[in-house]
Image (cartoon, coloured by chain):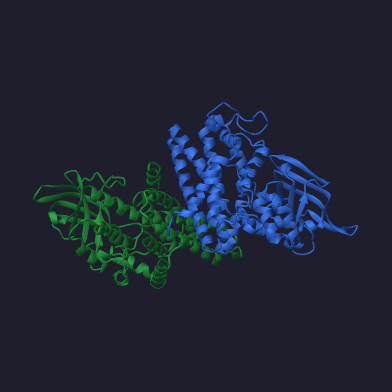
Chain colours: A blue, B green
Amino acid sequence: MELSFSSKDIEFRDEVRNFLANEYPKNVKEKIENGDPLTKEDIVDWHKSLSAKGWMGFNWPVEYGGTGWSPAQIYIFQNELGLAGCPPLIPFGVSMVGPVIYTFGNQEQKDRFLPDILNFDTWWCQGYSEPGSGSDLASLKTKAELVNENGKDYYIINGSKTWTTLAQNADWIFCLVRTDSSGKKQEGISFLLIDMKSPGIEVKPIITIDGDHEVNSVFFTDVKVPAENLIGEEGKGWTYAKFLLAHERFGIAGVGASKRQLERLKEISKDLGDDDLIAKVSQLEIDIMALEFTELRLLSALEGGGNPGAESSILKIKGTEIQQRLTELFVEAAGEFAIPYGGPDGYGSNVKPNGPEYTNDALSKYLNMRKVTIYGGSNEIQKNIISKFVLGV
Amino acid sequence: MNLNFSDEQNLLREQIQKFCNSDYDFYDRENFINTESGFDPEKWKLFADQGWLAMPFSSESGGFDFGPIELSILFEEFGKFLVLEPYLSNVVLSGYILDNSSFDKKNEYIEKLISGEEQISLAYMEQNRNYDFKNITCLLEGTDSLSLNGTKNLVLNGSNADNYLVTVNHNDVTTIVVINKDTEGLSINNFKTVDDRRISQLNFENVSINTDQIVSTGDEAEQLLKDAINYGTLCVSAEAVGSMESCYLKTVEYTKSREQFGQPISNFQVLQHKMVDMFIETELCKSLLYKSMIDMHENNDSKYRSVSALKSQVGISGKKVGEDAVQLHGGMGVSEEMSIGHYLKRFISIDSQFGNSHFHLKKFNNS
């Protein structure tokens, strides 16, 4: 057993640090530090800086234009991004639909979509949840009907998707749609790529409790999608969706970002001289340490060729609980400066300059982060997974 | 980075598991709880024959040079079966101090310890010291003929010890002396603990001490105590992790077999999620255990801080898992004849030893 990373990995870590110190867009960095909201352009700039370095495909194999990094390198890369306070990577292209396309798509689809994902020229969004299908995703109803027009096959889409993150910025959406309602509900689902400019698509904002416009409803009325946009086989969409979820879980713990927040909280609680807050922050530090080593244990198993399996649900559950706990303690530290709310642009940040700098986005983050225990398979669903696959009940 | 056990370490775990599975039946264990010694001397002999009592000693002292990783494995497995034999007091605490001291007669004590012939306990606790091993009130006075007065409390396995390593204040210098149980002026009161271990109070009244009984003094003595206690803290934490694992596994097994409302109670989601929480607490504590044992193995500066994080968490999580295990076993959980309640009592005892959760959280924050 050995705690430290190899000298090769340390060298790699320094390369990532060096990149972040010099090539991470300065205006984005400043906004993050001031707790200001990011525009679409800011987010694109940040991703493009990674594309320029050849690191956008950080978790992809070399043959599809990825870095081909080892699990340890991927871990280090994500951890350093978090420690440096970088905005989270938009996962829908690089971590979600990308791996599905290079694993299950045909050559034409790979050639058509993968380069744009790596260059961040296409902004993808995810069409999974529906008003009637949340945790019970397989009950989804958005219908895709195969028709032939002038010798060409199309799917006609009718239905709606919801909680679609940043659909207002998206060029494409990957959707789970129902192509068959006759058999078992999982077996009639297909995985379809849809151009957001298609006639019949309407995006309506959903304003969340932080006052922000992050998620949307997406309505489909007789939307015509070329059949060549189907990934893999009709009716196999559920299998691809499950594959995608397993891919998404890597790095979900967000330890790097949490450690950065924790350091700030430690300073604040000591400045305030509040022993009660200091004790809560210490407990959180132990929780983060335990989470970090749980992730490293899984990483070590992966590096040894093992499969982390359902245990990785622990990372989702504890990682998100810790992310929320951090925001709770920031609100506690902000005291009554937490409540002035609503910036000039309508975004849900605290009004400046009422309180110390750390109070600016304390409450908006707290409200925004309520989502993390709900999305990506709610924490209750994660517990069902552990119960079934680890405990065997 | 590598957090996988070596083949040799896995083999050691298998060997201990094999022993516990075949020789450590809970009902058989019950027979020894009420004997005078509180453990099975035959098993202690077996530990010696297997070489387990020699594990952490240096090869110069006749040991195997095993370290914190192997001891964590041993204690994790012991924790699964609530092993009673006094390994902690003898091998970990006294053994560490003797082995790493400059005491010239240490080998005769170590030999008898490794062979299982004699037992030796560390007496470092006093009243109202709140886990502080310094500021000792037991006074060793005089220059040529030394005389000891004072009281030591909570001496682990005190009733079975042939000798004691006693911390004393000698001219305001922390000093460790070795004292035989039959020494004149030493009176011993023996007690049972809530988890069926043996513990003693030692009263010294004008006990005369020879200079050749001095094991260590000053900075060396304080460093030895600090490290022995840190080692002991790691070991009981590893034991707690093993006990936690047993608790959730036994609870899963029980809820699968217990039927109410015409079905196994494991079908109920509220119980499933509670058991998942028990599993998660266990795995998180295990992760802290890995960090601590490797920090100690690599002798990193962070070793005391990691152990404090571990001990603090194990104190909270152990009790939580133990209480939930009792709850999910229903009335059976509070029955003395079932093992589950005994795990809870062990968690309570472990939390109170070497600094409880609150103590270690503060220590963690201040280091």
Tell me how many marks there are. Answer: 0
Q: Is B15 drawn above or below residue A143 in the view shown?
A: below
Name the residue at the top extreme.
A354
Residue A114 % position (x, y): 70, 53
Residue lying at 53% horizontally and 63% vertically, measured from the top left = B252
Q: Is residue A321 left or right of residue B223?
A: right
Image-quadrant location for residue B72: bottom left
Image-quadrant location for residue A370: top right
Q: Is residue B159 left or right of residue B246?
A: left
Residue lying at 29% horizontally and 59% vertically, measured from the top left = B89
Q: Choose between B293 and A280: the one closer to the eye.
A: B293
Q: Is residue A264 left or right of residue A35?
A: left
Name the residue at the right extreme.
A150
Query: Is residue A56 visible to the viewer in this orientation of the structure?
Result: yes
Q: Is A375 drawn above or below residue A191 in the view shown?
A: above
Image-quadrant location for residue A61: bottom right
Q: Is residue A221 left or right of residue B143?
A: right
Query: Is residue B271 visible to the viewer in this orientation of the structure?
Result: no
Residue A166 % position (x, y): 70, 43
Residue B182 % position (x, y): 16, 60
Q: Is B282 drawn above or below residue A50 in the view shown?
A: below
Residue A292 % position (x, y): 49, 51
Which quarter shows the C terminus of chain B? top left
Name the residue at the left extreme.
B144
Q: Choose between A278 and A35: the one closer to the eye.
A: A35
Q: Choose between B232 and B163: the one closer to the eye.
A: B232
